[in-house]
Image (cartoon, rainbow, N blue to C red):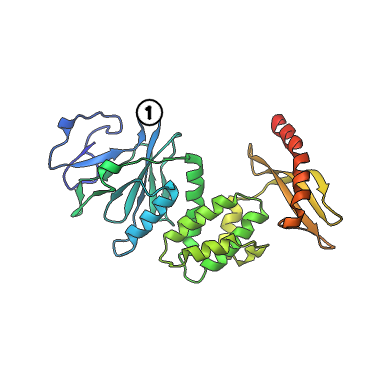
Amino acid sequence: MPIPANEKGPQVQDWPNATFSILDFPESGNIGLRMGPNENGEFRIALDFHYDVTDVNRFVKSRAVLMLLAETDKLMLSKGRRGYTGHFVTSEPVGNQTYEGLKADLLAHNKQTVVAPSTVDDVTRVWEPSIDNWTLPKLDAKQLLKVLELADTLAKYVAIDGTRHQIALGLRAFARTRELDVDLFKKALAVSLLGTDSHKVEDHLRTFDQETGTEYNTLPRPLYEDLDRMFRIHNVTTLKVFRLDQDTRVELRQTERGPGRISYSVRISRYDGANYHNIYVEKDSLTTLLAVLNTLHDEIGKLVGQA
């Protein structure tokens, strides 16, 4: 859509629904890219970073986060004054979001962003890579929102030097203890770390990958409370119990996290004389475990069918 020279927003009435032709774009004017549905039944979205202009690493940070989310280094980036804006499509509509911790805005319905070759605040927008190499990555909207929400929460804490190792250690333990999606937690941690000035992002991710036990007490207390609110378990029901040996058991469990949010999981634990604790299977137990899991297959199928 046409935008007046040196301006960031359109001055056209009802611009979200207006149509334009090439004649509406003067040589000296700016250009806005409108978010929302396109002609292919998909939805255009943009993630716009707004780091402080004094942050010399703002372009490195924003590019790294966008590349991680897109899972490719060939994406559509618009270089602005306070960082890059990344452009994507989704198969489902999403709402507009502001992520204070990540210093980013998700632009979607009835939003637009100024793009190259527009000039605003004496900075001319640039497409990277060049227009001949554009790709528009397609993202899973629901998964994207989960990653960004969790990363935004983490970003407030990993920004503090000296806490990142403890957070990485405790975060994996938190996800394991509550039987949550470990890959989601790792990706969100990476996104939050890439927005910092840390030169040890890979080290922190390796810490996260360690086979930790219950070290979630290394999390800062306010972060633990934030995570507890986000991933609170309402009810866990053990549906079946299978014993591997006298002290080790496998449980088929149903977890309820709210209306319509029910999942099934397999828990392996060992008795220490007082309580059962989660364990991680040793190689020599694998054959027995696989045999038990095979017997669970039909049970899970029946439960899914009933659900």
Question: Looking at this view, is 191 or 137 the one in front?
Answer: 137
Q: Position of residue 80 (x, y in %)?
A: 27, 52
Residue 222 visible in the displayed image: no
Would you place residue 32 above or below residue 193 in this image? Answer: above
Residue 170 visible in the displayed image: yes
Q: Position of residue 305 (x, y in %)?
A: 70, 30
Quarter occupied by the N terminus:
top left
Whether residue 4 sits left or right of residue 107 in the image: it is left
Callout 1, which amino acid? Asn
Q: Position of residue 242 (x, y in %)?
A: 82, 46
The number of numbered badges drawn on the structure is 1
Whether residue 186 sits left or right of residue 246 in the image: it is left
Quarter occupied by the C terminus:
top right
Mark 1 lies on a secondary structure that is loop
Question: Looking at this view, is 53 or 130 the one in front?
Answer: 130
The residue carrying pointer 1 sits among few (fewer than 14), some (14 to 19) or many (20 or more) residues within 10 Å by Cα, namely few
The residue indicated by pointer 1 is 40
Whether residue 275 sits left or right of residue 115 in the image: it is right
Which of the 4 image quadrants contains residue 35? top left
Q: Residue at x 50, y 71 (%)?
A: 162
Considering every residue shown, the one lying at the far right of the view is: 246
Question: Looking at this view, is 231 or 162 the one in front?
Answer: 162
Q: Position of residue 165 (x, y in %)?
A: 54, 67
Q: Residue at x 12, y 43 (%)?
A: 28
